[in-house]
Amino acid sequence: MARVLTPRAEDFPRWYQDVIAKAELADNGPVRGTMVIRPTAYAIWERMQADMDGRIKSTGAENAYFPLFIPESYLHREAQHVEGFSPELAVVTHGGGKQLAEPVVVRPTSETVIGEFMAKWVDSYRDLPLLLNQWANVVRWEMRPRIFLRTSEFLWQEGHTAHATEQDAKDYTLRIHHEVYEKHMRELLAIPVVPGRKTDRERFAGATSTYTLEGMMGDGKALQMGTSHELGQNFARAFDIQYSSASGSREYAWTTSWGSSTRMLGGLIMCHGDDNGLRLPPLLAPTQALVMVVKESDGSVTAAAEGLVGELAAAGVRVKLDDRVDTPFGRRAVDAELKGVPLRIEVGPRDLAAGNVTLARRIDGSKTPLPLGGVVAEVTAALVADQKALYEEALARREANTVEVKTLDEAIEASQTGWARVPWSAVGVDGEAKANESAITVRCLFREDGSAPAAQDEPNLTAILGRSY
RNA sequence: CGGGGUGUGGCGCAGUUUGGUAGCGCGUCCGCUUUGGGAGCGGAAGGCCGUCGGUUCAAAUCCGGCCACCCCGACCA
């Protein structure tokens, strides 16, 4: 068989680009750093969105939409925020053929404009908590773009909330972090992310606490797949989000923000992909099973295949028929593998003569004959089993590429190929700076029980160090 | 912004050293044969060689300016 993709072991970044091109996931846009998300990838994104959206709403947040353009002056109201974002802002200086009195920025994130409106909408403690989410595009003029992982424009959801107390803000941030993000990534994407706290050095510009979910990619590098922030009263003070408390005093609200983006598509590719292409978790896959007419002569094979499609669809399986018998079978099979379709049911004259079809599973690569009458049960079971298998494979790889060490030097060494788990006390602020010199970052910190610390100077914390995207 | 490199059909490249009719592979289209793991044969379409200027009888090729992109670094909530 001709080589379709650069093998991962030969050149992982090249393999990633190959998968994106050959599986028809995306193209580079005409402006540097922009991307065109093709239907194959967009369908996956829509399913991610639907799952994420449902989880977000179950925490009580409501969707809204704020403008793309933000007055430049808004960005300047929070000192750290503007410092963090200024280098990557796209600024519009002209409109309607005239120079604008005040430049507007294309939102890099919406804390500021949403803060402005929260100030209008929050008057009383009865107005809190105010829980908002929006699905939008944002623009950050990145120096070195990569499709899905870091593009100048990307799609995401950003949640913004205001609370009466610091504790309520913290509780909600962590609820989003674990119940929405962590579960979405583990249960739907089948990626065993590690939740934790970002160090002060890695914290979001303007936040008091930043929490992250780190996934390990196929080459041992880390990818931050979602993040949640406690913003303290920084934005409340900058935008004057005040309320009257139950006791009659004027108080600043406590705000949070949290986001997850199309970067998750890149994580999905790099976490589960193999040398034959993408592998999609069955729960996520837009098409879970592809019924293929291998070869046709008198219409009987197609009829049998159509029958199976009907049975599977009735059983709730997302199924499609591939009856393009004018295209060589090999091409169609390779294409389905590239795109990561979890199951193929191959129906051909030889199978049918024996009363069988062939079940080909993308996750483990197996091919087994199935009796025609048992297809639905087997397919349903395989979808469940393969969702679990994919997660366990990723978890096993993560564990195999994570080394437990005691010192900073050992951690830096181990980070060349994977992750290092090291006591944070052995790293510290100085050690973190030293690791950064060799492109290694502290991915996150967590307590012995796995929970996120309230500050990086808590005792007995563990750090994960690694290279990252 | 510093260092290095590249711009030639949709994609990947050769041709530039030594100026002389723009080529190859893949893809696309048509026809026939195929179709159980990216098929074979035949035919066809598609490029003012990044851009502007210079040298020359003649420039993809030599010279100069500009632009864009890629890699390494810096940067990356």
Image (spheres, coloured by chain):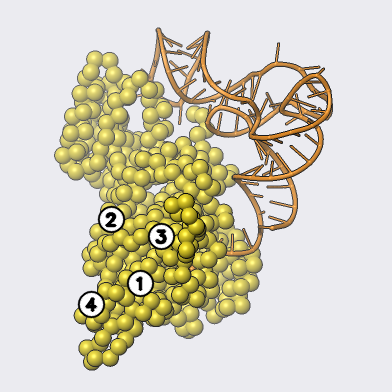
Residue type of the residue flagged with mark 4? Asp
Q: Is residue A47 above or below residue A61?
A: above
Mark 3 closeness class: few <14, some 14–19, many ≥20 residues within 10 Å: some
Query: Which type of secondary structure does the marked residue at label 2 adopt?
Result: helix
Mark 2 chain: A
In this figure, which residue is indicated by the disc labeled 1? A116
Distance from Cα at disc 2 to Cα at disc 1: 29 Å
Query: Which type of secondary structure does the marked residue at label 3 adopt?
Result: strand
In this figure, which residue is indicated by the disc labeled 4? A127
Q: Is residue A423 above or below residue A313?
A: below
Residues at marks 2 and 3 on the same chain:
yes
Residue type of the residue flagged with mark 1? Glu
Instruction: Give yes or no for contact between labels 3 and 4 (Cβ–Cβ under 8 Å).
Output: no
Distance from Cα at disc 1 to Cα at disc 4: 15 Å
Q: Colour of chain B?
A: orange
Between disc 1 and disc 3, whose residue precedes? 3
In this figure, which residue is indicated by the disc labeled 2? A51
Query: Which type of secondary structure does the marked residue at label 1 adopt?
Result: helix
Mark 4 chain: A
The chain that appears yellow in the image is A
Residue at 58 percent of width and 78 percent of height: A429
Mark 2 closeness class: few <14, some 14–19, many ≥20 residues within 10 Å: some
Q: Nearer the viewer, residue A425 or A13?
A: A13
Residue at 35 percent of width and 76 percent of height: A255
Between disc 2 and disc 1, whose residue precedes? 2
Distance from Cα at disc 4 to Cα at disc 2: 28 Å
Q: Which mark is residue A69?
A: 3
Residue type of the residue flagged with mark 3? Phe
